[in-house]
Image: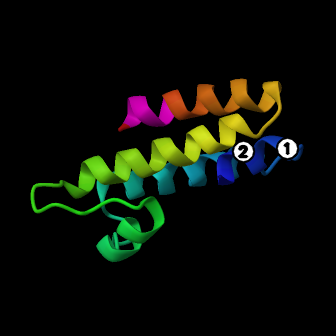
Amino acid sequence: MLLASLHALANPVQEEDVRLTKDLILQFLSGTFGELNEKAVEEEYEARWLPGDMKGAVRKALFLEALTKCLENCAQVTRVWLLQHAIEVRRAY
């Protein structure tokens, strides 16, 4: 996840990069950035896309899956940083 890689940066541009990344995440969650490919989601997650499935809920699930994978595979300090920033994204959404 891009937010995790930004934590490792130690330069003045970091704040702007974090802001842009949060903005992209918000756009993804709201459906204004990118289009979900139902077939790709079905193949990647071995799940059937049902007519009643809402794309917004699927987008949130995909974001949470990505965040969970990052949290499982990063250092403790990065976990804390990611959670703080993910909560900020959630509040904004």
Other-residue count near label 2 (Cα within 10 Å), few / some / many at <14 / 14–19 / ≥20: some
Q: Are marks 1 and 2 in contact (CB under 8 Å)?
A: yes
Q: Identify the image quadrant of residue 79.
A: top right
Q: Provide the residue designation for mark 1.
A: 8
Q: Residue 63 bears which disc, if any?
A: none
Amino acid type, callout 2: Ala
Amino acid type, callout 1: Ala
Q: Nearer the viewer, residue 18 or 87?
A: 87
The magenta segment is: 88-92
Q: CA distance from mark 1 to mark 2?
A: 7 Å
Q: Provide the residue designation for mark 2.
A: 4
70 shown above or below 48? above
| Residue 20 x, y percent position in the rendering | 58, 54
Secondary structure under badge 1?
helix
- Give the left or right position of residue 84, taking residue 57 as reference: right
Secondary structure under badge 2?
helix
